[in-house]
Amino acid sequence: MKFSANNREKFLKAFRTKSFDLIVIGGGITGAGIALDAASRGLKTALLEKSDFASGTSSRSTKLIHGGLRYLKQLEFALVKEVGSERAVVHKLAPHLVLPEKMLLPLREKRGFGSLITSFGLKLYDWLAGVVGKDRRLMLTRRQTLRREPLLKKDDVKGGALYAEYRTDDARLTIEVAKKAVKYGAVALNYCKVDKLSYSEIGSVNGVCMTDLISQEVIQIKGSVVVNATGPWVDELRELDKSLIGKRLHLTKGVHIVLPRKKLPIKQSIYFDVSVDQRMIFAIPRGRTTYVGTTDTNYDKEIDKVVIDQADAQYLIDGINENFPKVKLRVKDIESSWAGLRPLIHEDGKSASELSRKDEIFISPTGLYSIAGGKLTGYRKMAERVVDMVIDNSPIRKEAIKCYTHKIRLADGQLINSRAVRRYVNQLKKRLPSLGLRAELSSYLVENYGKQTEKILLDLSKFSDEDRKLALLKSELHYTVRKEMTCSSVDFFMRRTGRLYFDFKSVIKYKDEVLDALTLMLDWDENKKQQDAKRLELEISNARNFLQKQ
Ligand code: FAD
């Protein structure tokens, strides 16, 4: 089935009429990963997301596919080994979307670890993750460190280290995984909220009752196994199942701020500590911006309304000014932001930062599977474990084949490796001006869509706007509505293009035109259009929430 927003009725019909082997609740990276794993092994799979795909934590991370260097300090060797090795696998599956990025780790007098321990730690990190060749860690002298990042506070830098990580776009990764799951036969739909679970006469879960939040239709879906992959909402679903006993979630909030690159013109990604609480934070250049994060604070408010507050913003701004004294940033320099919740598993007596990032699977007495914890980076392995367990424990499709998602490349028209990605970026740089577009847009397009960019450029001629950037935006909208289930302007600006974070001004400039175009594409009436406009304004204001109390 085509993953098109104009095709929703076909997806809903499948929910009404089919009976599934597996129903996955939650369209974040965990749920999308499980759906792809299950569908590719031949299981009849449904994936239900109450808002948009990746609208939970999976669009609000630091956007790194990383081994989690700091988990070494917590002696979580198995976790570092698994996610460290997964980096290379996920990079191979989507080299345009998971890009190698060297991380600079400055070493300071009387702060953090010494150079000997760091050198050993990074060597262990490389070894656990199977890093080879020139990607292995490189220790730097004070001079080399300051040459790599001249903006660093010079007084106490005594050296540094460079090590390999990957950067990504978490929401796009989730959407590509969900898209691929649909290609393998999964029926996956956003704006489908599970309200209730249904049970057999002997009390085993055998389906769900969901509401399509667009048409308000209520549908009963039958499924042999139900998996709860709802991230921060996992306990809400366990409560519905009356099985919230024993281990519980412990939610911690993490925020990121986005600054214009010219205000924080660092030369590369950097991981540095903040003296007020000795935590480490990242600063990562992306396009015309640099983003910085994150915080890690306990959270017990409404899960559906997580926003940055002024204290979060000030903490990160102070951390930057302390480490890069020349930039002299103020909260009002922040262009955009996001806040997310880590769905961690509670451990008595441990602080937010000390809690393990390991995933765990709970099976309730009714047979509901819930998966909690984990990281974006480890999504594929987590999915494999869940589906293995489902197949082992139940009569469904015992003949199902073994997991092979490590061979399923994401995104159509694959670019096979980093070299092919670079070559394609350079090719586009030459082609874009002849289409009336700036050459610099090539990196944005390739890192978002990979080779799928060709489809967007092909449709560009359908849009006659004199402002070609607007025409491009409309062509992207057209593509993402028809191929990626974009159902609202927020889906488009936040999760299909990342513009609400990384090109904030373009959202303000073009939002009305995009709304008009979307109204036509989705055949909305005026009421629907106004509702959508309101939701977009809310997200625009949330991204700048820190300004409200200035
Ligand atoms: P989510 O993405 O939250 O998905 C759950 C989904 O379930 C949501 O979309 C929600 O709408 C849906 N849902 C809830 N209830 C229902 C219902 N009743 N019916 C239907 N759908 C429902 N990991 C990394 O590997 N690298 C990083 O750099 C990194 N940085 C991070 C930084 C921060 C600040 C945070 C918070 C996390 C970070 N992580 C990182 C961890 C990673 O982002 C998460 O582990 C991952 O995104 C969790 O995905 P998920 O699918 O389990 O949850």
Image (spheres, rainbow, N blue to C red):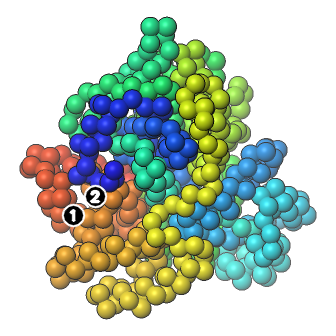
SS at circle 1: helix
At which x and y percent is residue 90?
Answer: 61, 59
> Can residue 189 be seen in the rendering of this structure?
yes
Question: Dot 1 corresponds to which residue?
Answer: 514
Q: Is residue 162 left or right of residue 394?
A: right
In depth, the one of 402 and 463 nearer the eye is: 402
Determine the residue positioned at 76% across, 72% down: 135
Q: Is residue 39 above or below residue 321?
A: above
Q: Is residue 287 left or right of residue 122?
A: left
Q: Is residue 506 above or below residue 340?
A: below
At which x and y percent is residue 33?
Answer: 53, 46
In depth, the one of 473 and 200 nearer the eye is: 200
For badge 2, the amino acid type reads Val
Mark 2 vs mark 1, foreground winner is: 2
Question: Dot 2 corresponds to which residue?
Answer: 481
Q: Is residue 536 above or below residue 150?
A: above
SS at circle 2: helix
Q: Is residue 33 left or right of residue 127?
A: left
Q: Earlier in the sequence, mark 2 or mark 1?
A: 2
Specify the quadrant of the image occupied by residue 215. Answer: top left
> Can residue 300 be seen in the rendering of this structure?
no
Determine the residue positioned at 58% across, 14% down: 365
At which x and y percent is residue 447?
Answer: 48, 70
